[in-house]
Amino acid sequence: MAGVRRWVHGFACWVLLLGGCGREAVVAATICDDLEAGDLVVTELHANPNGSDGEGEYIELFNTTRSSFALDGLMLTASRADGASPKAHRFIGASIDAGAYFVVGNAPVDSMPAHVDYSYGKTLGNLRNSDAVVSVRCGELLIDQVSYEQTIDGRALQLDGRLAPDHELNDQAVHWCATPEGVDQISDGNFGTPGAPNSPCEVVQIEGLCFEGGAGRAIRVPAPGEVQITEWMANPEGADGDFEWVEVRFDADTDLNAFQLGPAPDALKVVIKQEDCFRVDAGVRVVFGASPAAAPRVDAELEFSLGNSGERSILAGVDGIVLDRVDYDGTVEGAAWQVDPHGELCLALPQDEYLADNFGTPGDTNPSCPLVLAPGMCFDDGTPRDVVSPGTGDAAITEWMANPAAVGNREGEWVEVRLEAAVDLNGLVLSDLTSSTTTVESEDCLRVPAGAHVVFARNTNPSENGGVEQVDAELSLSLNNSNETITLSIDGQTLDSVTYERSTAGVATQIDEIGNVCAAVHAYGEGDLGTPGLANPWCF
């Protein structure tokens, strides 16, 4: 036996029940100062032995501490469930080893069976077969207490052997069972495991518990803010039923045993159905896959389908309480949706191919999403800022080639605009009488200094456009050779407008600094006349 075999001393110290034997009472007080609730745990009791209950009853205690200690002065009590009819026994001359079982029984000292370490004789009478309470106290300290509603003849009641002995776990009836089948007899018709680890009860998942190293413990559930759905593949290249997956990041140590996923609050399902604790360390990303082939690493099964079109949701929770939710509208085949480190949602990048024609980072940290510009903004060396647009008086049409001779109209037409302030070209619009328009569109800020001459050309290649070297933007509209109006605007506001009745082949029309209009006289490129991108000479 792991405990120390002891017996009841003489009649004189039975008066301890009434406060006698002062020396022992002082010892008990000293012991109580060193004990805490749960240091001793009731792990098994046999209240209904086969045959006469007068002998064969026992109670098993377990020392949960790392130290041996004397039991002298501790009180073992038994009563009805409501506390009525209490009977008690005070331990004398007994001790229990660290991490050991100690079995006390009602058999006489001179005929104790081998599995009993200590006899409490007749002090507790016969243990009740139903609706009873057994407790261990040290002075005013309740070290442990268990209650039971009923017993089975010949079979001890025992704390589930899959659970570590614990004074709180043994408070719940669901954690107890009659000694299961397959256990050897301790005496004729009596079954139990006194002085030894208990057998597992019937294999049933105990709510709120999982098992680690053969012992049960409370499931660690995530709290709000500790769970984030970070990535999902709803429309993979290949069979959706094989290659869909969802990635979830846990920001605290967690057990997945109680974790739920689903497409709606009323459709959350537990994803792990096992008794063993499924531990996840803080910071880990768990991949739930439709099959083991869904991603390079699949940690657990995904038990619902993700939608490819329309407004869809994925929710994570515990006990039906939603801890995180993502919403998406539509998919792109082969591209996962990702939540980046800044909380932005975007599709996976083309460089992140994890399977053939499937893109994402399942199980790994997501990259930052490409920056998305808000209306009226542009990137200035990669940093978003507001577009600086020209206002009234900041921009003027100063020259145009409507009828080139060196090359055809499609290649050689161009329009020049002078900017009087440092602005961005983004959003500038050129239009003609047919309502054809050219809009300058770019995510990058197209900054130009004050005094710049900006050229819009039908063809940006100098070897094809008649030799216009400086082209700032492509001109998509076609200029009429006669009876045409060119309008420059931004956000619906007209900045400048010019009208001409005719044009001369190979000669641009110019406006000088004081507003005079004349034909160009200086040649450029392949011989047509004009000064595209340069200040115009004075008209005479």
Image (spheres, rainbow, N blue to C red):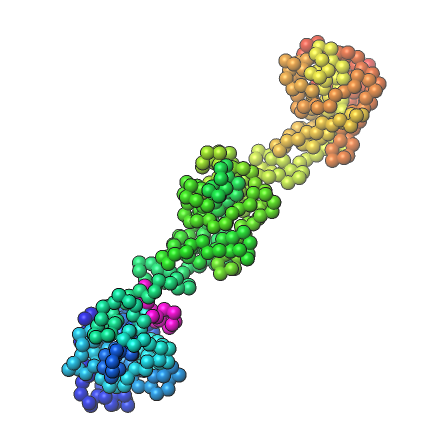
Residue 360's x, y, as percent?
48, 39
* Residue displayed at 25% across by 78% down: 50
Residue 184 found in image quarter = bottom left
Q: Which quadrant holds residue 46?
A: bottom left
Where residue 172 appears, as percent x and y from the top left, is 39, 71
Residue 264 drawn above or below residue 15? above
> Which image quarter is the N terminus in?
bottom left
**Quarter of the image containing the C terminus?**
top right
Q: Nearer the viewer, residue 51 or 368?
A: 51
**x and y percent of residue 281 in the render?**
40, 52
Q: Which residues are magenta?
A: 160-177
Q: On the rendered structure, is 96 left or right of 441?
A: left
- Identify which residue, 403 or 295, lies in the foreground: 295
Residue 39 percent location from the top left of the image:
30, 72
The structure residue drawn at horizontal position 28% and vertical position 90%, both measured from the top left corner, is: 18
Q: Residue at image x 47%, y 41%? A: 243
Choose top left, top right, bottom left or bottom right for residue 382: top right
Horizontally, residue 300 falls left or right of residue 473, namely: left
Relative to 302, does residue 449 appear above or below in the rendering?
A: above
Q: Is residue 250 visible?
A: yes
Reply yes or no: does residue 180 show up in magenta: no
Q: Residue at x 19, y 83 (%)?
A: 108
